[in-house]
Image (cartoon, rainbow, N blue to C red):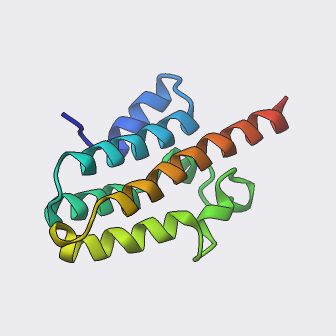
Amino acid sequence: MATLLELEEMVRRHKEGEDPFELAIEKWVRIRDFLKRKADPDRYRQAFQCGSTKIIFCLDYKDHCPFCPLEKICFDGQSLYYQIMRSLQVYSLAGALLPREPLIELIESYIRDLHGYRDEWLKKSH
């Protein structure tokens, strides 16, 4: 069963040494899998709630957002992240009536983007 990745679990795992990019990617993989299981407005609301919670980068770069490797996502109102969040709001109201595939495709694109951001960050840090 696909369960959502909560901030508390991410914090615990990060303290144990897990990579913040991998945790962010896992968060969105779990959201995608959670939504694939059932088209239900409540599930979309839960996914919206999970998607809008902070990730480890928000805690690590608190008050220093310009240094965060994901800064351009947070401050661009047209970013894929914001497209997904707006879609989740719409699906929260009418999710059972809308096809899931467009939303799932957006999330899969975002997951690919996160992998790309991670690769860019690793290249810069070496």
Question: How many labels, in total?
Answer: 0
| Residue 55, horizontal then vertical, whole percent | 48, 49
Whether residue 6 is visible to the viewer of this picture, yes or no, is no
| Residue 88, horizontal then vertical, whole percent | 33, 68
User: Viewer-proximal residue, 4 or 115?
Assistant: 115
Identity of the residue drawn at 20% across and 77% down: 93
User: Viewer-proximal residue, 12 or 82?
Assistant: 82
Identity of the residue drawn at 59% across and 68% down: 79
Image quarter where the N terminus lies is top left
User: Viewer-proximal residue, 40 or 11?
Assistant: 40
* Image: 22 above or below 82: above
User: Viewer-proximal residue, 90 or 25?
Assistant: 90
Image quarter where the C terminus lies is top right
Whether residue 59 is visible to the viewer of this picture, yes or no, is yes
Q: In this view, does 73 lie to the left or right of 100?
A: right
| Residue 25, horizontal then vertical, whole percent | 49, 40
Identity of the residue drawn at 47% across and 49% down: 108
Identity of the residue drawn at 26% across and 71% down: 91
Q: Is residue 109 left or right of residue 97?
A: right
* Image: 72 above or below 36: below
* Image: 8 above or below 77: above
Q: In this view, does 108 lie to the left or right of 61?
A: left
